[in-house]
Amino acid sequence: MDQRIIDLYDEYTHRPLTRPEFLRRLALLAGGMTAALALLPRIEVNAANASVTTEADLFTERVKYKGVNGEMEAYVARPKEEKPYPAVIIIHENRGLNAHIEDVARRAAQAGYLAVAPNALAVLGGTPANDDDARQLFQELKQQDSIENFVLAFPYLKTRKDYNGKAGCVGFCWGGAMANTLAVRQAEGLLAAVVFYGRQPASADVGKIKAAVQLHYAGLDTRINEGIDAYEKALKEHKINYEQYVYPGVNHAFHNDTAPTRYDAAAAKLAWSRTLAFFERYLA
């Protein structure tokens, strides 16, 4: 796949680029609109491609908790045995809670965690089935309200008998930036934050971080990687425990198995194994 096509799709999914303009530019790269339309199934996110982690030996439920601007909803998964577990907040990309993120929650649950995956779009009626509709709806969210709604997931954890008081978070893309923000905000009980290709916090805010931080970057993700050096410098200056990994030759969203041209199975597997080892170190 031509890297220019992958970069164009990344621009379409992260910047104000209309679908007609995206298709026009895709047609120019592909050599015509017919070729562009034939390419779409290969580049667009498709829930049908998602892994399905079995719910065997898992307890799952859908819950609600009070947000700052309405009721938040979340998907919860944990081992079936009723006892307190360390929690991991799973933070979705800029499409809301979908099948892929629910699967990631089940993966965390299978590793022995109480996984809670809030939906930022709950306050706007939930995640639309159509990815483009979700993209448009996301633009209506107020960033500060979204931050507070994820911060409120941590006091919600305290109401659960299956929570042991230790929490981590992992976020992807938009959710990666949110994971960084939760670390800066020192969300209650947060001991470890894992960030997949997410925007970095302002250097002036890095000193507020108390949690350990693990960072995963895609080697071809020039948009996000612009902030690597400044963030790492600030982490070192403030003596914050962190790990940083850059995966050469892979694209933004390499962990998302519903994104056919950007998903990289080897990098995704390695990054997830590092994520679980990190949580084991700080949440055990």
Image: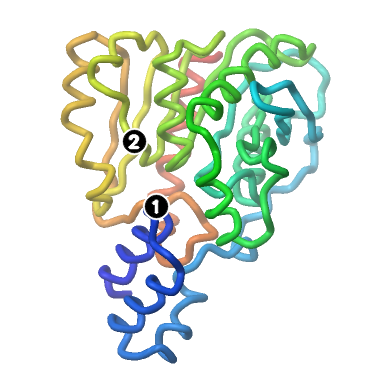
Residue at x-position 37% and y-position 37%: 198
**Front of the two marks 2 and 1:** 1
Q: Is residue 23 above or below residue 32?
A: above
Please name the amino acid that badge 2 sits on: Arg
The disc at residue 200 is: none
Point out the image quarter for the N terminus.
bottom left
Report x, y in % for residue 17.
39, 61
Q: Is residue 17 above or below residue 150?
A: below
Q: Is residue 70 left or right of residue 104?
A: right
The mark nearer the N terminus, 2 or 1, is 1
The disc at residue 199 is: 2
Residue at x-position 41% and y-position 33%: 177
Residue at x-position 61% and y-position 34%: 108
Total tally of numbered discs in the picture: 2
Q: Is residue 153 left or right of residue 177?
A: right
Colour style of the rendered protein structure: rainbow
Report x, y in % for residue 92.
55, 41
Q: Which residue is mark 1?
A: 14
Between 118 and 160, which is closer to the camera in this rendering? 118
Point out the image quarter for the C terminus.
top right
Please name the amino acid that badge 1 sits on: His
Between 34 and 53, which is closer to the camera in this rendering? 34
Q: Is residue 27 left or right of residue 146?
A: left
Q: Quadrant of residue 33?
A: bottom left
Q: Secondary structure at mark 2?
A: loop
